[in-house]
Amino acid sequence: MLNEQETLHFLRLAKEGDNGAKETLLEHNASLLKSILKRYLGKGVEYDDLFQLACMGFLKAISGFDESFGVRFSTYAVPMIAGEIKRFLRDDGSVKVSRALKKSAREINRYIEQYSAEHGSQPSVKEIAAAFSMDEGDVVFTLGSSKMPVSIYEQSDYKDEKSATLGEKLPAKDNQDEMIERMLLKSAIEKLPEREKKIVFLRYFRDMTQSEVARRIGVSQVQISRIESKIMRDFKKELDG
């Protein structure tokens, strides 16, 4: 993955409309997307579809990120990506969306092949966008969404590397899943009312007992126990999607 300064550099370019910068950010954050979507495997949606949804959430994160937030881009992007996947799973719309993207990608690829055969070179993104009455950014995303999921499982073209897929080669830190958990948990905590947020802080970051928290908050230990149980149930729902 890119370091923080490199990420900010490409984010600034991407927000100015540089599609190459968007592609660079997507490429170098592939392991992050993979770690997030792993949480949603086995829920009736194919890996390719989940990857496309993760890409959509990632691009929304690029668009919505503001350096004045004072947080790392990955901290902002993780809940956005997870939220995009969860919304489509909840609304059962992921398959429809992915099929539409795949159809558009196939049509664009056919156009590129025909254009290349006639002109001896590939069309520019601008020419493709004009041919399909699409925004240039949508062209880049459509083509990227059709290629990137496939490349995760696609074997190398080199004969001596046939046993390894790109997915197996993608670098990922051992604590990647733990990092994702922390980011999603942080996002969930920030949504809590102030009193519940304080209870979580005292119980799990100050290691105070329920009785000690009850005295600090000014309620009974039984109330703290009930509130804590509700918070944990809500956290589990948030993290599990």
Image (spheres, rainbow, N blue to C red):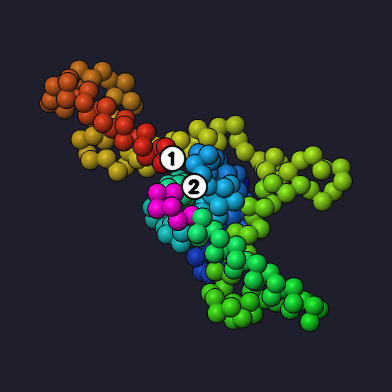
In this picture, residue 116 sits left or right of residue 49: right
Q: Nearer the viewer, residue 78 or 162?
A: 162
Q: Which mark is residue 94?
A: none
Q: Which residues are magenta?
A: 89-94
Q: Residue at x 49, y 41 (%)?
A: 43
Q: Position of residue 75 (x, y in %)?
A: 45, 45
Q: How many marks?
A: 2
Q: Which residue lies under the disc numbered 1?
A: 183
Q: Is residue 215 above or below residue 154?
A: above
Q: Which residue lies under the disc numbered 2?
A: 74
Marks 1 and 2, the one that precedes in the sequence: 2
In this picture, residue 202 sits left or right of residue 51: left
Q: What amino acid is at disc 1?
A: Met
Q: Are marks 1 and 2 in contact (CB under 8 Å)?
A: yes
Q: Is residue 20 magenta?
A: no
Q: Is residue 216 above or below residue 12?
A: above
Q: Residue at x 60, y 66 (%)?
A: 103
Q: Is residue 181 above or below residue 28?
A: above
State the separation of the CA atoms marked 1 and 2: 9 Å
